[in-house]
Image (cartoon, helix red, strand yellow):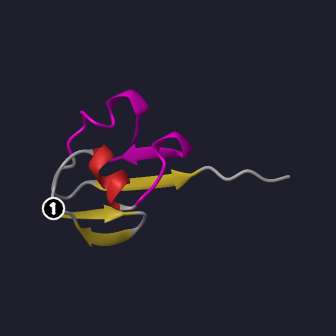
């Protein structure tokens, strides 16, 4: 399937938001996920299926000062 991830077209084999996060080796506790303009709550990352054509933004939290 094809998705748009952080503004770029990507091929994705399918699965859930959590599968996508793991594929990119991200820590799910340190990111926010937006799918088709709506925030996906962390509790449902593993239950939310990624669909062909989805527009997904993965935003990493970084500390600083």
The stretch of residues the image draws in magenta is: 25-49
Q: Is residue 60 above or below residue 33?
A: below
Q: Is residue 11 left or right of residue 41?
A: left
Q: Does 16 appear in magenta?
A: no
User: Relative to 19, does residue 1 appear above or below in the rendering?
Assistant: below
In the orientation shown, which residue stands out farthest toward the right? Answer: 65
- The quadrant of the rendering that contains the N terminus is bottom left
Residue drawn at x 50%, y 44% as measured from the top left: 32
Q: Position of residue 47 (x, y in %)?
A: 24, 33
Q: Quadrant of residue 11?
A: bottom left
Q: Residue at x 62, y 49 (%)?
A: 61
Q: Is residue 41 visible?
A: no
Please provide percent x and percent y for residue 31.
Answer: 52, 46
Q: List x then y, in percent, for residue 10.
A: 27, 70
Residue carrying label 1: 13
Estimate the x, y position of residue 25 in percent, counting from the top left. 42, 59
Residue 23 appears in the picture as rendered: yes
Above or below, comparing residue 12 to residue 58 in the picture = below
Residue count near mark 1 (Cα–Cα under 10 Å), binned few <14, some 14–19, many ≥20: few
Badge 1 marks a residue whose secondary structure is: loop
Asked whether residue 26 is drawn in magenta, I would say yes
* Frontmost residue, 17 versus 2: 17
Lateral position of residue 64 relative to residue 15, left or right: right
Relative depth, front residue between 32 and 4: 32
């Amino acid at each position: 399937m094809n998705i748009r991830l952080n503004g770029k077209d990507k091929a994705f084999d399918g699965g859930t938001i959590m599968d996508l996060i793991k594929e990119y080796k991200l820590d799910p506790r340190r990111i926010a996920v937006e799918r088709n303009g709506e925030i996906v709550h962390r509790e449902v990352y593993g239950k939310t299926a990624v669909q062909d054509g989805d527009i997904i933004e993965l935003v990493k939290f970084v500390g600083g000062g």
